[in-house]
Image (cartoon, helix red, strand yellow):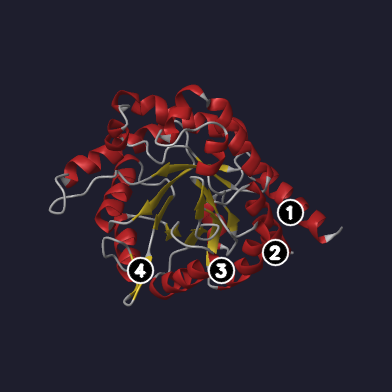
């Protein structure tokens, strides 16, 4: 067999051996495997008609065909984790969009759409993003209310059949920890990924709310996250350095989802500079830094994920 054929054969054999569910993510990570996630959703949704200022979750109510199509494109490109369109699906976030009464519909339909699209070819990764509100004393949101909001969303996502939960793009460590704690209150066993977004400062990588990588590693692990890491914010080169910082401070598996570079805006449209070939050329350094879950964030497409898939398969054979 050629190398690509061997990789495909191994993947098919693994799927057959797991009896329908593609794999156990904890087992794969424990044996040192690299798992490929999906890429950005926002650009693809806008290309399918999502208007500026409209929450992406509105597509879960009346455009599930679009959600299934995007999920299918990513799994066809080789993604093993498919994100649900529920980043803004917490009650607090939905209330800001006038959708406070649709929490169950928004989250359940997203999970079910992803499952229909991928079947047993990939795991459904339920996305939980920031509430958009500030906890006391910086804002007026009590921690208990935020915890309950995340718990309500997590309960629907898990009941609908998500395989794991990904808490992502967090900048407030306290909020991220509350989100992890909320998921753990619903399920002590479901795998949880927690990723934060950092900025480059003279003190190293720090979130806009002041959390360092070291503090994130400690706090997220204490809250119950199985996998820690970073998404959004920067392109691949900077995220390689973020990954190295995570490796220095954590023994848990690391997940990294970089943007396709920093965008430029032309006529109101964001253009991202890093091509699939650019990502694949730099991704070996990301894997050498110890990253075990690799995917893309803003500006990345199924073509970026296809390039990552080819790289990971080539290193595996």
Q: Residue at x 37, y 39 (%)?
A: 88
Counting residues from the N terminus, which is met first, the one under dot 4 or under dot 1? 1
In the shown orientation, is residue 212 left or right of residue 253? left
* 123 up-or-down from 94: above or below: below
* 253 up-or-down from 182: above or below: below
Q: How far apart are marks 3 and 2 (CA)?
A: 15 Å
* For discs 3 and 2, the disc positioned in front in the rendered view: 3
Q: Are marks 2 and 1 in contact (CB under 8 Å)?
A: yes
Say what secondary structure mark 3 lies in.
helix
- Front residue of 64 and 118: 64
Rendering coords of residue 63 (x, y %): 52, 25
Q: Distance between the residues labelled 2 and 4?
A: 29 Å
Which of the numbered marks, if any, corresponds to residue 316? 2
- Residue position marked by numbered label 1 in the rendering: 10
- Residue position marked by numbered label 4 in the rendering: 213
Q: Distance between the residues labelled 4 and 1?
A: 36 Å
Rendering coords of residue 204 (x, y %): 35, 75
In the shown orientation, is residue 210 left or right of residue 7? left
Q: Could one spot residue 119 in this view of the protein? A: no
* For discs 4 and 1, the disc positioned in front in the rendered view: 4
Q: Which residue lies furthest to the right in this view?
A: 1
Q: How far apart are marks 3 and 1 (CA)?
A: 23 Å
Counting residues from the N terminus, which is met first, the one under dot 2 or under dot 1? 1
- Residue position marked by numbered label 3 in the rendering: 286
Counting residues from the N terminus, which is met first, the one under dot 2 or under dot 4? 4
Q: How many labels does the image show?
A: 4
* For discs 3 and 1, the disc positioned in front in the rendered view: 3
* Residue 182 lies in quadrant: top left
Rendering coords of residue 129 (x, y %): 37, 45
* For discs 2 and 1, the disc positioned in front in the rendered view: 2
How packed is label 3: few (under 14 Cα within 10 Å), some, or many (20 or more)?
Answer: many
């Amino acid at each position: 067999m050629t190398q690509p054929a061997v990789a495909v054969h191994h993947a098919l054999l693994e799927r057959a051996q797991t009896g329908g569910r593609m794999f156990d993510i904890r087992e794969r990570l424990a044996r040192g495997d690299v798992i490929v996630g999906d890429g950005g959703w926002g650009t693809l949704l806008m290309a399918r008609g999502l208007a500026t200022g409209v929450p992406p979750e509105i597509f879960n109510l009346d455009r599930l065909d679009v959600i299934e199509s995007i999920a299918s494109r990513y799994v066809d490109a080789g993604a093993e984790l498919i994100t649900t369109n529920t980043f803004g699906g917490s009650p607090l976030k939905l209330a800001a969009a006038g959708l406070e009464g649709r929490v169950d519909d928004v989250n359940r339909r997203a999970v079910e759409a992803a499952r229909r699209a991928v079947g047993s070819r990939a795991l459904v990764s339920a996305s939980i993003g920031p509430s958009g509100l500030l906890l006391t004393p910086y804002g007026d949101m009590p921690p208990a209310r935020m915890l309950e909001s995340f718990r309500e969303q997590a309960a629907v996502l898990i009941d609908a059949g998500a395989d794991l939960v990904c808490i992502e793009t967090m900048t407030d460590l306290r909020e991220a920890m509350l989100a992890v704690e909320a998921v753990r209150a619903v399920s002590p066993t479901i795998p949880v990924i927690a990723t934060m977004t950092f900025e480059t400062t003279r003190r190293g990588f720090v979130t806009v709310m002041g959390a360092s990588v070291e503090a994130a590693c400690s706090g997220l692990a204490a809250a119950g996250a199985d996998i820690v890491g970073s998404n959004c914010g920067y392109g691949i080169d900077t995220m390689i350095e973020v990954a190295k910082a995570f490796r220095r401070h954590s023994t848990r598996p690391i997940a990294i989802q970089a943007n396709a570079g920093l965008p430029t805006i032309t006529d109101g449209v964001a253009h991202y500079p890093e091509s699939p070939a650019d990502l694949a050329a730099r991704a070996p350094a990301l894997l050498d830094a110890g990253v075990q879950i690799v995917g893309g964030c803003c500006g990345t497409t199924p073509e970026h994920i296809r390039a990552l898939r080819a790289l990971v398969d080539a290193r595996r054979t």
